[in-house]
Image: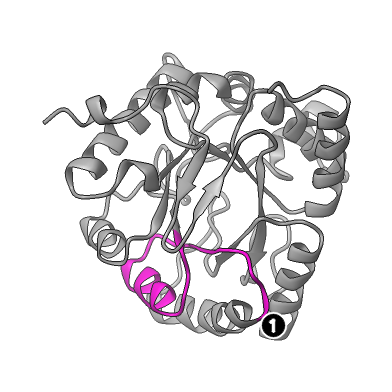
Amino acid sequence: MDSDNHISHERATSWTIRTRVLRIDKRPLLMGIVNVTPDSFSDGGNFFDVTRAVEHGRTLVQQGADLLDIGGESTRPYSSPVTPDEELRRVMPVVERLRDVVNVPLSIDTSKPEVARYALQAGVEIINDVTGFENEEMLRVAVEYGAGICVMHMQGRPQTMQDNPEYQDVVREILEYLRKRRDVLVRQGVEPGKICLDPGIGFGKTHEHNLTLLSNCQRFHDLGCPILVGHSRKGFIGKVLGDKQGDRTAGSIGVALSLAQQRVQIIRVHDIQRVRRALLLFEATGGIAS
């Protein structure tokens, strides 16, 4: 069976997760980031304490986050992996407490099936896997629990991905990778409407690759799935600004407006309040086409 025959090639306007359907008609949904890690590239250590992480998640929702993505392992370039037990120790208390105090869907940012399983049992609705669900056990967990899934492209692994990434045509190659992963997942039992796709900004891409992808995100709508982009505070922003050590908030907002204009459905950001306010004004003044 050719699964491509069962998938729309128009821009997706909804994402089906475990217990609800998220509508994405005009303004992109904002996914807030809760890093329960000591070493994430931007806010590592800021929310490593459970109480601080939970309060941060609550604040992001109050500021307008539509979803929260909770992670316990840094995937920054050259980061060191952690064991499943350590990752569970970090994230599960945060998941269990946030589940009871916020009303937005929770996502678990993990590449480990056992972490995903425990998180889903605790009420998480989405698995965000930077390794593209290439682990068959992760795929089985997703199907078993009916989770929404986010499939990301990464060339290499965090420990090596920035050594020398190469593409002949970065947009075409990543689009085809995501198309193939989508089709494999559908053949293995994932409902097409549950799949979200992420081109993986900063994951095995040079500065030029990132800018090319961000300028061409509208092309990924041909895949018929919601598109998620996580550009927030990443290194290419500092390079464009000519200030690698400076604040990247304004740059993150600028990219978010470009993504909104390209009708990207979900934007994963640190600075929820500022991005949301910018998007509201962008839409109010005609920046987001209907």
Residue 19, by quadrant, is bottom left
> Which sits in the foreground, 156 or 219?
219
Q: Secondary structure at mark 1?
A: loop
Residue 194 lies, in percent from the top left, at 38, 48
Residue 281, by quadrant, is top right
Residue 177 lies, in percent from the top left, at 34, 30
In the image, 258: left or right of 217? right
Residue 46 appearing in the image: no
The residue drawn where x is 76% and y is 63% is 60
Which residue position holds label 1? 49
> Which sits in the foreground, 12 or 244?
12
Question: Which image quarter holds the C terminus?
Answer: top right
| Vertical order, 30 against 51 (above or below) | above
Residue 197 lies, in percent from the top left, at 45, 39
The residue type indicated by label 1 comes to: Asp
The magenta stretch is 101-126
Magenta stretch contains residue 114: yes
The residue drawn where x is 50% and y is 84% is 89
Question: Which image quarter holds the N terminus?
Answer: top left
